[in-house]
Image: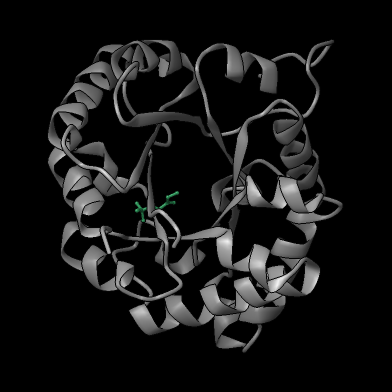
Amino acid sequence: MRTPIIAGNWKLNNTISEAIELTQGIKRLVADTTDVEVIVAPTFTALAAVYAVIQESNICLAAQDVYWENNGAFTGEISPTMLKDVGCEYVIIGHSERRQFFAETNESVNLKTKAALTTDLKPIICVGEHLEDREAGNTEKIIEDHVSGGIKDLSAEQMLSCVIAYEPVWAIGTGKTATPKQAQEVHVYIRQLISEAYTDEIANQVRIQYGGSVKPDNAAELMSQPDVDGALVGGASLQAESFAHIVKSSIK
Ligand code: 13P
């Protein structure tokens, strides 16, 4: 049985005081929730303040990106060790916005994933096709490329520490959610890819989140799919009530 995992990707939103207020709200609303892993991913500048709020709670901290070197002349970057130091347990890697606007590639995703794992940070590796890919019948090809590129050369043990987030780009911030059937189909395919690269047993343990316009009113149906193990939530994670509602919808 895989524990559902719901992460709020706050993207480029919230000052430190706004981040604290949002976290306090989420903390209060999910305080009694068990059997779900709850994660918030603020911007780098709010990580320390959010960590202070969630200590000794059932909420974990994630960063939205990481660099693969631990120190040196890399102006503007943040290392895995720094993220660990500020209290992160997870890090989102290869989000489609980073692939689209910041030249993220499968190679950089793989370097970041390996660096995170070496530092005991759990990667949430994002994969997903564009609308043109889906319409051209290339969804599986893109997913295969993103998954195999991201997890390249990971040991079985490292694979088990990763979460995969399937985020069809056409569903992100558009209000157009993948149907539960579409999500389930791709999740099964991702599990099959992991099984081919490792074993069935490992594939059955890795959690696969769905992301893309997850809202309180569609979360339960998406989460009820057998291979959908949680959600990576953008817009709806910016309000404590809607995020907490999604967290509660994920309990199977
Ligand atoms: P939305 O939930 O706003 O569509 O964003 C999804 C996402 O990109 C989470 O990483």
Q: Position of residue 105 (x, y in %)?
A: 76, 50
Residue at 25% over, 49% down: 247
Q: Position of residue 6 (x, y in %)?
A: 36, 48
Q: Position of residue 79 (x, y in %)?
A: 70, 20
Residue at 14% over, 28% down: 28
Q: Position of residue 195 (x, y in %)?
A: 71, 72
Give whichever of 248, 93 is nearer the camera: 248
Residue 10 higher or lower than 50, as above or below: below
Can you say which quadrant of the picture contains the N terminus?
bottom left
Q: Is residue 67 left or right of residue 234?
A: right
Can you say which quadrant of the picture contains the C terminus?
bottom left
Residue at 42% over, 62% down: 229
Residue at 19% over, 38% down: 239
Q: Is residue 16 left or right of residue 184?
A: left
Query: Would you say residue 105 is visible in this rendering?
Result: no
Residue 7 higher or lower than 150, as above or below: above
Give whichever of 97, 70 is nearer the camera: 70
Residue 165 higher or lower than 179, as above or below: above
Q: Is residue 82 left or right of residue 151?
A: left
Query: By what rule are the colours in the image chosen?
Result: one colour
Q: Is residue 30 left or right of residue 182?
A: left
Query: Would you say residue 223 is visible in this rendering?
Result: yes
Residue 38 higher or lower than 143, as above or below: above
Q: Could you tell me how many numbered marks the image carries?
A: 0
